[in-house]
Image (spheres, rainbow, N blue to C red):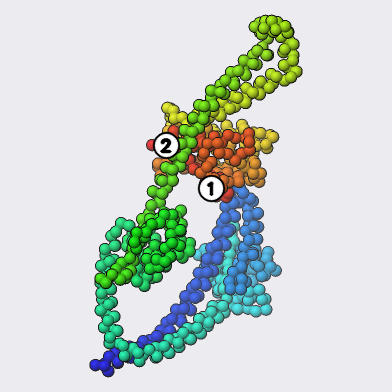
Amino acid sequence: MKRNITLHIITPAAISMLLFAGTFAFVVMPFIEEQLVAKKRETLRDVATSVWSILDQYYNDAKYGQMTMAEAQHKAMSIIRNIRYGPEGKDYIWINDMTPKMLMHPYRDELEGSNVKDFKDPDGHYLFRDFVKTVQKKGEGYVDYVWQWQDDTGRVSSKVSFVKGFEPWGWVIGTGIYVEDVKYAIRNITRRLVYFFLAIITILIGLSFYIVVQGVRLETERHLAEVGRIHSERRLSDIISFLPDATFVVNRDRKIIAWNRAMEQMTGLRETEILGKDSTMYTPVFFSHRRKLLIDLIFTPENIAEYARTYIRFQQEGQTVAGEIFAPRLGREGKYLYSVACPLYDENNVIVGAIESMRDITERVKIQERLIHSEKMLSIGGLAAGMAHEINNPLAGIIHNAELVQMRITKNSAKNRKVAHEAGVSFDDILGYSEKRGIPSLIKNVMSSARRAAQIVDNMLGFARKSETVKQTVDISTLLDDTLELAKTNFNIKKRFDFRKINIIKEYAPLLPHVSCESAKIQQVFLNILQNAAYAMTQHNSTLQQLTLRTENENDRYIRVEIEDTGPGIPEELQQRVFEPFFTTKEVGDGTGLGLSISYFIITENHNGTLDVRSGKDGGSNFILRLPLD
């Protein structure tokens, strides 16, 4: 029996080594060579696609009037000329048109501007004709030919290039790899694999004797353990598969043994792709770098204090840990997750694995943030109303008494003349004295300042007051245009502020449904935002003063309006504060800090909509307003 076992162990081992050698020589190496070539070719495609994107960006900039088409072509060509990649940074991109005429070549500038239709490589191929034919036939593709070695004009080598057409300009962009580079990489890989193969053979021979001795006992124990493990993992996988929360399990070696359907939906990773992999393999799905999650802390409890600081909230009860964390790579804008992890034990109370469940709490977090912000704004509104009422009384007294003083000094009335005569002076003398001392002007300034303060107080009361509203159905695009015309009447030569000099771009969605609102108040909101944007661009000395107005139907629930400027923008830490009363970044005397606060309450309190601000696509600020359709 021992002899049979020995033969059963040695014979498969020997056959395995022979199969390994054959597989290495006839399967692995050809496969590696094929994959390496495929990877190189895919790299060429990626590079050409990236360059195509550069051309497309400049073409769109020119198309929408940001520059001329000639300027766009020149700038795009200048950027592409300096692009280098590859192991030595000498691989490049060239451009020719469909004539074909060479437009740009980093290493063969003598060809630029010349017709290369009849240009042949050393093997007699009209390579530029082939480039054009490939683009005309399929839009992109690979072409084989012979070309100089990188920037060495005295050396030629076989080359494979990928060419891609840019139809708007009739250009062909191309980049290539040298066959010799691929062969050199294959030789290096072959040499390393041969050394690796020899080392494995040596180790296998050394282990053969030990395998013979221990084979029977280990094989029996392994078989029993494997059967038990498979049954256990299968039962566990069946149990967690239908759990509503995203759940996965790892064994004591931190290999993933269960990955339920909710986890597949959250991460996009299929169970068949992740089973048996190390637990850190999935972390890039959540984060931009590899890091431990709660399930890893089960096996390294000494790191709990360190990793607890990386969670928004963290708690531990015994060996169960829970926490909230933000996963920036989930979805389009990241997701907030609540996770719970705990160990799994066998019948001997030994940890054999761990389980972790995750729940998407993004909506809950956003609702909490909105509630906190709304409560803050409401409390500030109440404070503003109280302050306004307290200020109103002395302010009314100032205005009333200033009017009385003005009337008794400057009004040529019978009563004033009589009192002046009784005091032994002429009213004309009093009037002359007051005019020479500028008293009427001073009183007028007092009254003007008091009325300005009264207007601020009125704005404060309007900020906090909820009143009955009379709504009407309006076309929001038309209302925005009307507000725009009103804004154009506002200019200030001293501050170089002229709304009429701002470039306006309108991106209105067609056939928008009408929305029910107080048109005057909504127009006030538009006007506040437009004037703030114009002021910001003027003070920023923007070379391109441009406003982009957008309207769209958002899921048949809201009319969405965006007002985006090219000003200095609002830092992220200040974007929530811009809607707070009295908060302003303008100079003293230029603003009270109430315009956006009142706008916020008009939209949120009076119209059940939303008003947010974000950074614009090209800098500046983008105010986003939503009005409900129902």
Q: Are marks 1 and 2 in contact (CB under 8 Å)?
A: no
Does residue 175 lie above or below 507 as drawn?
Answer: below
Question: Where does the image place residue 594, in percent across and percent down from the top left?
Answer: 54, 34
Q: Amino acid at mark 1?
A: Glu
Label at residue 608 = 2
Label at residue 573 = 1
Q: Which one is earlier in the sequence, the residue at label 1 or at label 2?
A: 1
Residue 111 in view: no
Mark 1 to mark 2 CA distance (whole Å): 25 Å
Q: Residues within 10 Å of mark 2 (few under 14, many from 20)?
A: few
Whether residue 107 sits left or right of residue 8 in the image: it is right
Question: Where does the image place residue 456, in percent across and percent down from the top left?
Answer: 56, 29
Q: Which residue does the image show at 49% across and 72% down from the upper left?
A: 39
Toward the viewer: 396 or 34?
396
Q: Quadrant of the C terminus?
A: top left
Toward the viewer: 409 or 552?
409
Q: Which residue does the image show at 56% across and 61% down from the upper left?
A: 52
Does residue 206 lie above or below 97 as drawn?
Answer: below
Give the quadrant of residue 281: bottom left
Toward the viewer: 489 or 177?
489
Q: Residues within 10 Å of mark 1 (few under 14, many from 20)?
A: few
SS for callout 2: loop
Give the quadrant of residue 540: top right
